[in-house]
Image (cartoon, helix red, strand yellow):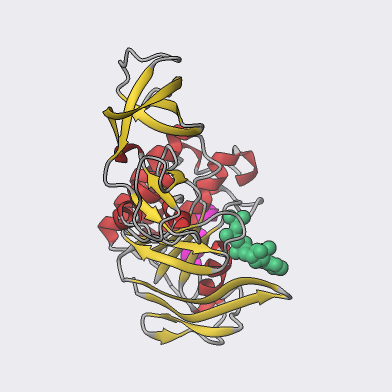
Amino acid sequence: MAEVRLQNVSKSFGRQTALEDVSLRVPNGSFVVLLGPTGAGKTTLLRIVSGLDTPNEGDVFIAGRSMAGLPPAERNVAMVFQQYSLYPHLTVRENMEFPLKSPLLRTPKAEIARKVGEVAEILQISHKLDNKATALSGGEMQRVSIGRALVRSPNVYLMDEPLSSLDAKLRADLRVELKNIQANLGATFLYVTHDQIEAMTMATHVGVLDHGRLVQFGTPREIYEQPVSIYAAGRLGQPHINILPADLFGPAPSGAAYIGMRPEQILQGEGQDSLVKRVEHLGDQTRLHLAFRNHDLTTVIDAHTPLRAGDIVKIQPLKPFYFDAAGARIV
Ligand SMILES: Nc1ncnc2c1ncn2[C@@H]1O[C@H](COP(=O)(O)OP(=O)(O)OP(=O)(O)O)[C@@H](O)[C@H]1O
């Protein structure tokens, strides 16, 4: 396993900028999750580390060594894409053995069998090992793709939304397994997801990308508790952070245009009246949709709340965030 470092990496496709001056250090043994909406540059960043794309400027270092000019095969990285890419004519076992059979590695047969068995167990596909890859469901094929990466011991695992095609239960299981693998092997992961639960539970560090720029890098807790901007604050947290006019609840710090409040930054039972519009039971969470002076806000409440639509509840901000007109955090 190894450290990965991007140094002032920029990449454009014609007039479209995909990455702009990105410097990022993925420490050895860390699990770095990249967050950002569609088009933010996440996939491009992974492809540049893997060698599938070449930066226009800047350089990538793996284990301290510049990767300039090195093709993917010589970087010893394992990549899992969102869409599985298996050899259809091979069985599941053969697909998973494939990377270990590379003449460069010369892995002993018994070692290959042990490794494939172990990874198949983790991914819950042991009973499918002798099936043809084409005889699998989409979710099973994706697990085989992940398996093909996990049998190896690369410098870094690059994963692009690997769990997004799986059902909720399997996604939750594999989230735990991938995190265990990473922790046990001390493996380095660079991982793209839209799923903030994956980000919060698996990441040691989160990188927030906005239009090709890395706007914040830190632990998931830092990004959640100390976001640098409205944009970064909006990447994590369900329900979404409430962004309202800065002086809606009273005087605001100078320069503030917006007040930002996550659910735990809204104190209930004290302050000013707000109208309950809806109580929404989601199973693991109960949401309270409120109207306050013609603004909507959402917070969470105890599942056994007696509140109903039409009731009045007092609220007040509790250590809220303040942002300037451009969305940068000021307090
Ligand atoms: N091969 C390409 N040719 C032209 N433009 C591209 C190419 N690859 C990426 N882009 C552009 O670069 C920008 C970043 O794309 P990228 O796929 O890295 O974003 P992303 O954050 O991974 O998005 P998604 O979550 O949808 O996968 C986008 O504007 C995209 O249209």
> Who is closer to the viewer here, 48 or 58?
58
Please tell me in which quadrant of the rendered image residue 204 appears: bottom left
Above or below for 89 versus 18: above
Above or below for 166 versus 65: above
Instruction: Give the main secondary structure, helix, strand or loop, of the magenta stretch.
Output: helix
Viewer can see residue 146? yes
Q: How many marks?
A: 0
Ligand 1 positioned in quadrant? bottom right
Q: Position of residue 244 (x, y in %)?
A: 46, 44
Q: Position of residue 319 (x, y in %)?
A: 27, 46
Name which residue lies at 43% across and 37% down: 239
Above or below for 142 versus 192: above
Name which residue lies at 41% across and 13% down: 308
Name which residue lies at 37% across and 84% down: 64
Q: Quadrant of the C terminus?
A: bottom left
Q: Quadrant of the N terminus?
A: bottom left
Q: Position of residue 242 (x, y in %)?
A: 43, 41
Q: Is residue 131 magenta?
A: no
> Who is closer to the viewer here, 45 or 109?
45
Q: Position of residue 316 (x, y in %)?
A: 31, 35
Q: Is residue 99 magenta?
A: yes
Name which residue lies at 46% across and 50% down: 234
Above or below for 292 versus 331: above
Viewer can see residue 178? no
Residue reaching furthest to the right: 14
In the image, the segment drawn in magenta is 94-101
> Who is closer to the viewer here, 11 or 250?
250
Residue 57 in the figure: left or right of residue 308: right
> Who is closer to the viewer here, 206 or 4?
206
Residue 310 in the figure: left or right of residue 307: right
